[in-house]
Amino acid sequence: MFDENCLFCKIIKGEIPSEKVFEDDKIYAFKDINPAAPQHILIIPKIHIESLDMMEDQHKGLFGEIMFRASQLAKELGFNKEGYRVVANTNDFGGQTVHHFHLHLIGGRKLTWPPG
Ligand code: AMP
Ligand code: ZN
């Protein structure tokens, strides 16, 4: 369920403080400590899944809920119409630094493409 050494597991347990924007029994969402845009939220499963690369058949519903939550939060926070981006950096080449799956929800400014 939890990984003792995982930063985001510690955030879920409340051992490390975070700015919560949403929580239910399966999902936790909080503000990124180093925002890349005016709106930058991380949405994570409460169970420790290392990355999108570790997704299994049993996780399909959970990942669907995480994507749904991104859509809902963008609406609730009022930056959906202008637009936003959801990103799941995965493993080394994907630039993942925290190895607990997280969806970045980024908005509030015009974003450029392609990423670096
Ligand atoms: P990634 O590089 O995709 O693994 O993203 C990890 C994200 O976690 C980065 O955007 C960091 O700014 C963010 N982060 C790291 N530590 C914390 C923390 N204690 N609270 C909130 N966000 C954090
Ligand atoms: Zn974890």
Image (tube, rainbow, N blue to C red):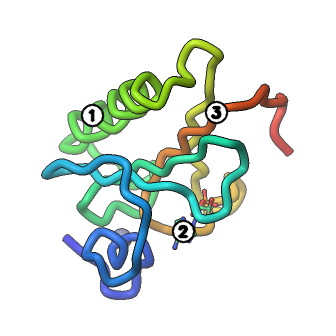
The location of residue 98, given as percent across then percent down, is 54, 68
To which residue does mark 3 refer?
A: 107
Q: Given the image, on which type of amino acid does mark 3 rest? A: Gly
Q: In the image, is 103 to the left or to the right of 21?
A: right
Q: Amino acid at mark 1?
A: Glu
SS assignment at label 2: loop
Neighbour tally class for label 1: few under 14, some 14-19, many 20 plus, Cα within 10 Å: some
Q: Quadrant of ligand 2?
A: bottom left
Cα distance between the residues tagged 3 and 1: 20 Å
Name the image quarter holding the C terminus.
top right
Where's the N terminus, which quadrant?
A: bottom left
Distance (Cα) linking label 3 and label 2: 21 Å
Q: Where 76 sits versus 11, above or below? A: above
- Residue with the mark numbered 2: 98
Q: Nearer the viewer, mark 3 or mark 2?
A: 3
Q: Cβ of disc 2 within 8 Å of ligand 1?
A: yes
- The residue lying at 40 percent from left, 76 percent from top is 17
Residue visible at 30% across and 66% down in the picture: 48
Which residue is outermost to the top?
A: 81
